[in-house]
Amino acid sequence: MENKKGKVYLVGAGPGDPGLITLKGRQCIERADVIVYDYLASSFLLKYARKDAEIIYAGKQGGNHSMSQDNINDLIAKKAGEGHVVTRLKGGDPFIFGRGAEEAEVLAEKNISFEIVPGVTSAIAAPAYAGIPLTHRSFTSTVAFVTGHENPEKEKSGINWEALVKGIGTIVFFMGVKNLPNIVGCLIDNGMSPDTSIALIQWGTTPKQASVSGKLSNIVERVKAAGLKPPSIIVVGDVVKLKDTLCWYEKKPLLGKRIVVTRAREQASDLVNLLSENGADCIELPAIKVEPPDDWAPLDKAIGNLSTYDWLVFTSVNGVSFFFDRLFSKGLDMRSVGNLKTAVIGPATEKRLFEYGIKSDIVPKTYIAESIIDSFKNEELRGQKVLLPRASEARAILPEELFKMGAIVDEVTAYKTSSVCDESINLIEELTNKTIDMVTFTSSSTVKNFAALLPAGNIGELTKDVVVAAIGPITADTAKNMGIKVGIIANSFTIPGLYEAILQYYTKIV
């Protein structure tokens, strides 16, 4: 049997914004058996990894290395030598101050197949997100990338400071915050005017981005006052003058706000995308997971008797999906529900049902069970048989009120939600240290399972300084009953409605 040949992809993960990963870079993450990633590579990108992939953190943060470069070289070579496809995920671009060439040299020496996948370097991206073009025909057509932290073992600097000052219009320094006074001194000593514009961008392209600009003569004091720390990019040159005019990213209304999204992981992306687009630092904390019911028998029985029902009522997207997945698994198709009238709660549920080719007969104006009850008051339900496939822990008000109208209600479990303990975030520590600005709840079950992650009796204290946003009044009441103060209740009980309420809160739009 022929041995499987391993291969290493040296992938530039981009500067921090996970949206800046290249298509090929994402493909390498998706196909990898082993992923070795750095401190500056967004951990968000790991969601593209296969569930069975081995994930290894290589560290390397400003002198605090969890793994030495030699160890990293040996690791990726060893994993590839065992026949694995290895994706080495490096912040920025692997060949621009990324030591990717050193890793490639080791692989070449060991005759291990590899490919280089370039990434968006922070030298370009961080200034762009701060509104600084590196070249501009009114200012300069030359640019240089320079290390701000040379190898300390060198006897003398390898940088030709005089050539930089006299020959380059824009100079970008990597890793130079701690060495800023020396960089400024070398530039001025070699003829650069103290009035030359300079800017520092910390954590460029991420929700933690912050920037400070000034002149060579005052930048050290300004950076110290602002408390900027690594990782930061330094840009020197007249193009920095355009920063105030072209700055766009730091004007995002939610920039830097750390918001916990508690929705089930597979459903959180819509809210995360909306919040992230406006600068929020979203923490996905899937307090619940959606699963099949413990017993399919009741739903299977109802599906087998669909011809006896008059109405099919869905209260959630999950109910629609699980119902039709089960229907199809029994070898049936849409003709089985062709004679049934349908009702849904909410536009998202309406949309999901329409994806199966069914336009709902009833869509209430608001998105809670009480509203669908009001809509049914115009229907003659006496003696009508209603199938209600939904979550095992759903509220009882809907079947009870339909029964009062004379309907024969079959409430069956189509799915269940259960608590998830996600160890990717130390929730109690984060709340105690007040590093979380907001927690969002999209259902009563997310509230209950979030509360289950906290010490009993201490929920109110841990969340007192956090803004809590609820998708609607029912969810808000659940939170309040558990001692959680709710600051935002969406007017429209949908994900877009919750997003708009959060945006209005932070921008003070009334």
Image (cartoon, grey):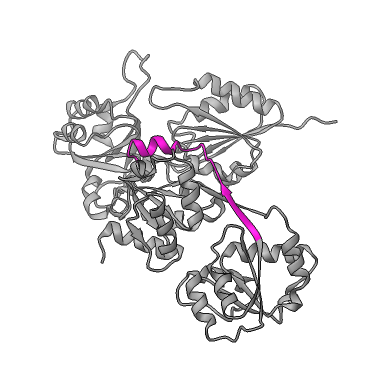
- Where does residue 438 sit, x and y in percent of width and height? 36, 49
Give the answer, above or below, for where 319 lies relative to 179.
Answer: below
- Where does residue 161 sit, x and y in percent of width and height? 26, 27
| Residue 425 belongs to magenta span | yes
Q: Closer to the camera, 273 or 203?
A: 273
Give the answer, above or below, for where 108 lies relative to 116.
Answer: above
- Where does residue 270 sit, x and y in percent of width and height? 49, 58
Magenta-colored span: 414-436
Quarter location, residue 164: top left
Name the quadrant of the C terminus.
bottom left
For residue 471, side relative to residue 380 (left or right): left
Which residue appears at 21% of the width and 48% of the height? Answer: 241
- Where does residue 119 sit, x and y in percent of width and height? 48, 42
Q: Closer to the camera, 502 or 304?
A: 304
Question: How many labels, in total?
Answer: 0
Which residue appears at 27% of the width and 41% of the height? Answer: 169
Which residue appears at 21% of the width and 34% of the height? Answer: 223
| Residue 193 belongs to magenta span | no
- Can residue 25 be seen at all in this image of the molecule? yes
- Can residue 472 be seen at all in this image of the molecule? no
Give the answer, above or below, for where 166 lies relative to 469.
Answer: above
For residue 482, side relative to residue 222 (left or right): right
Name the quadrant of the N terminus.
top right
Quarter location, residue 387: bottom right
